[in-house]
Structures are given as structure tokens and as C-alpha cells.
Amino acid sequence: MMNPRLQHQLDFLRAVDALKGIKRQTLIATGERQETDAEHSWHVALMAWVLGEYSKAKIDLFKVVIMLLIHDLVEIIAGDTYFYQTKERKLAKAREQAAAAKIFSLLPFDQAQILKRFWEEFEERKTPEAKFAAAMDRVQPIINNFLTGGKSWREHNVTSTMVLEKCRHIKNGAPLLWEYIQQLIQEAVEQGMLPA
């Protein structure tokens, strides 16, 4: 008979495999298809490790990577809500809270509590780790949108003002990267891929 703790851990790992099938509105850098939540989570976690030196404050990089690997797990149940759909994003919060409780409860209690705390910390964006993780979560789609000529921005009628407004928290976690992103957005406007 299988160890109950191991059974819970395996059940969780099977359930979160579904993240590989959740499509986002952002395209992969080549523009050939939408990325999945799993691809996004992997990419932002790797970005955090590579760009960790640009954090505004000293951070526990391991904690940041874990936050980024789990931050979208709730979308397995709650679904992906496009970042620039402000009304829908507000409604998604309650769905995501319920989804977090359900997904993390598949784990043994001690692990469930740790991951749920990390997820909540990421959502609140108050600690240096959460601020940097949130910055990475916004930097990656902006770069991908730029690399694809702004295709998904145009499909969703996103303007430079919307991007700047919704992503300004990048400066709270990584001020130098915020400067870079502002330049990238300006270049996107000048090249006609993002309306002013």
C-alpha cells in the first residue's frame, strides 16, 4: 500500500500537469502560437534567476523562483483572465482564491500551507521577493509582445497607456528593468506595434 503522504504529493503533481494546457493570450517569442501557463511560469522563473541582480532589494531568489513556478496554478481551475481586462480581473480574484484552496489542499498539510503562503505573498506584492516576482511576471509578456510585433496587443486593443499603467509596479521590484521596459514601450509606439 502506498504511503498516504506520497499519494497526496503524486495527486498534486498529476493535477498541476494541467497547467501545460492552459493557453495565455501572449504569444511565444517566435509569434507562431500562444504560450501556455506552464511555459510562462518556467520562463519567468528562469528570468528571475538570470535577472535577480536587478532586484530593488536583497531577495531570497529560491523563494522568488518557487513563487513564479506556482503563481498561475490557480488558472487550472479559475481559467486565464487576460491581464488588460480590468473588470474581469477583479471578478477573477474570488475564483482564484477558491482555486488556490482546492489545488494546494491536494498536498500534505505542511506543504499545502507553504505553497499557499507563497502564492498569497505573490498576490499581495508587499515583500521584496513578491515585488520582484511580480515584476518578472510583467516583464516577460511585454518582451514577448515586442518580439512578436505587438500582435496580441493589437488583437486586444491595448494601448501604451494601458501597458504603462498596469505594469508600473515593475519599478517597485526592479527599477532598472522598469527603465528598460519604458524604452521598449516607447520603441513599440514608434514602430506602430502599440498605439499611444
Image (spheres, rainbow, N blue to C red):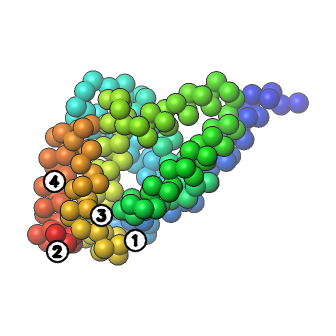
| Residue at the spot of label 1 | 32
Circle 4: element type: helix
Marks 4 and 2, how far apart at CA: 15 Å
Q: In the rendered structure, are the residues bearing label 4 and label 3 in contact, judged by CB atoms less than 8 Å apart?
A: no
Q: Nearer the viewer, residue 122 or 179?
A: 122
The mark closer to the camera, 2 or 1, is: 2
In the rendering, at what x and y percent does residue 173 appear? 27, 37
87 lies left or right of 180: right
73 lies left or right of 186: right
Circle 2: element type: loop
Marks 1 and 3, how far apart at CA: 12 Å
Circle 3: element type: helix
In the rendering, at what x and y percent does residue 64 appear? 40, 33
Mark closer to the chain start, 4 or 2: 4
| Residue at the spot of label 2 | 192
Query: From what the image shows, is residue 36 above or below residue 58?
Result: below
Query: From what the image shows, is residue 1 above or below residue 147?
Result: above
Marks 4 and 1, how far apart at CA: 26 Å
Circle 1: element type: loop
| Residue at the spot of label 3 | 145
Residue type at mark 2: give it: Gly
Marks 2 and 1, how far apart at CA: 20 Å
In the rendering, at what x and y percent does residue 48 appear? 34, 38
Label of residue 88 in the image: none
Point out the image quarter for the C terminus: bottom left
| Residue at the spot of label 4 | 182
